[in-house]
Image (cartoon, grey):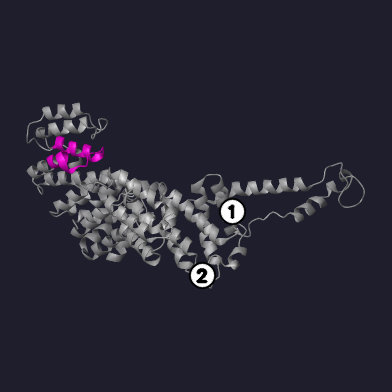
Amino acid sequence: MTTEEALQSLEPFTATIPVEALNTIRTTWPEAEAALLAELDERIEHPYMDDRSARFLYALFLLAELKSAAAFDRYLTLLQLPEKMVDQIFGDILTESSHHLLANTCHGRFDDLKALVENSHGYEFARSQGVYALLELVHTGAFPRADMESYCMELLSEKLKPYADYIWDTVITACDALSMKKALPLIRQAYERHLADPFVQSLESIEKALAQQGEGAELRLSHIDKLGSTEEEIVFYTEHWGESGGPKDPDFTDLLTAPATVRQQNQRTSRRKNEPGRNEPCPCGSGKKYKKCCITTGYIRDKACEAEPEKGPKNRTDEWIMAGHYYDKDGQLSKALACWQKAWSGVRDAIPAAITDPDDAACNTLFNGFDFLSNWLQDVETAIDRAASDSLRAIQFGMDYFPAVLQRFPAMNPHIVGNFGASLARLECACGRSDAAFERLQQMIDTNPDDAQAYAVWADLLSFDAERFNLPLDIVAAQQLLIQAKLQVKNADDWGIDSRIEKMCRWND
């Protein structure tokens, strides 16, 4: 079996573990290592994507099993992504195995593990894996126990931010595992300040456990067992794949049923509204009452329908557009986005290639689901922006949709371009790509220095929205952006620049 054949054997979601392929990969290292590292790089670039094959998960364990030094930085990058992305990428692996991944590939880079632990804007459960990795390295003799004990004391006394976070509970657990009676005063202080969670472990239980241990007792912690072989580690997941066959794309076909039913009801209501009363003269001119003439033929119903035609969908894409509006109006945002995601490729294909502005009149006769294409594009943009904080699927859609619209319609109204650029910057932050987001916002400022939008959005990301996107809080930089906007832009009032500056000042106070 060649290396490429072995790598391809890792792709199916199946209960059968490809043992021969795994052994081939082990014997053809580092050729296979480069391909597996590329799997991690692809996920770093697109952290919001669903797994299309099982190869990424095999890569996580194989790289750690074979102690790939190059994988260590990738693991750190993945673990320092925003919470939603970390959960999407790792799932149960986060708490079950990621400390093993770090410990196996660390190769003495203890300061980098400490940086993960001390990353105050990082995901608390990901930060905790750095502590458990260091404990594992103590257990294997790679990291001196005395250094770990000193580090725990530093964390409890000065290096952890003074707000409740699971990282406090993790460090206290580490102190317990290390039999650190000397840490008890700091541990008690953490509970008194409500930084540690008594429901994770009570102070009484910690005090009792430490009282029963002698200083320097053998490490006792379930998390410090070593990483097994890839076959051993991944068997839990492969058993699940055997039942499900791996992730499947959702079937949204049923979403068309309710809007179609309502549309048919509205059509029937419209016909009845236009139909004459039973005892009224028949509109056909016979002189008879309607009930004695055309009521049974349907003639008048047909004429009434022709007089006020109901605009139905022209095709399946149009049906998805209309369904999206139905769910959006009903407050069912996730269903609206699912419909519009289905519609988007059809809309894009229907627009003539020569059209670069969605306000072109030729766009507005293609579908009945919208009066103006540019309005519908903005409806979708607003829905994604609203849903992205809670919906991974909205992020997935937006990361495709926003760049595609900006590229497809270069002559689009600058105001709409600004809205799309700002929304894309927020999504990039949600995906851990803040550098790309800030570069985008800087380009918006360079292109339109008189417009306040990019200044305001950037300042919000550094302040009010920082926690939401796991970004470092930087009030000073946010204030500088707002002051620059106040001095330079023409629409400061539209974006509440003064009120934003006042809020920043109160924040500092």
Q: Is residue 26 magenta?
A: no
Q: Nearer the viewer, residue 92 or 149?
A: 149
Q: Which amino acid type corresponds to the residue marked 2 in the rendered image? A: Thr
Q: From the top left corner, tell me how far across and down residue 376 is, in percent.
A: 54, 57
Q: From the top left corner, tell me how far across and down residue 104 is, in percent.
A: 18, 52
Residue 51 shows in the view? no
Residue corresponding to mark 1: 322
Above/below status of 196 relative to 228: above
Q: Main secondary structure of the magenta part?
A: helix
Quadrant occupied by the C terminus: top left
Residue corresponding to mark 2: 356
Image point 18% across, 56% down: which residue? Answer: 67
Left or right for 127, reference 295: left
Quadrant occupied by the N terminus: bottom left
Image point 60% across, 68% down: which residue? Answer: 362
Q: From the top left corner, tell me how far across and down residue 495 is, in percent.
A: 42, 53
The secondary element bearing badge 2 is classed as: loop
Q: From the top left corner, tell me how far across and down residue 478 is, in percent.
A: 31, 53
Frontmost of labels 1 and 2 is 2
Tell me the crowding category of disc 2: few under 14, some 14 to 19, or many 20 or more residues within 10 angstroms, Cα based. Answer: some
Q: Nearer the viewer, residue 74 or 266?
A: 266
Q: Is residue 163 magenta?
A: yes
Left or right for 342, reference 459: right
Left or right for 406, reference 369: left
Image point 45% across, 49% down: which residue? Answer: 386
Going by the picture, which residue comes out furthest to the front? 487
Q: Nearer the viewer, residue 53 or 202?
A: 202
| Quarter of the rendering containing residue 196 | top left
**The residue stretch that appears in magenta:** 153-177
Above/below status of 506 relative to 316: above
Q: CA distance from mark 1 to mark 2?
A: 24 Å
Q: Which amino acid type corresponds to the residue marked 1 in the rendered image? A: Met
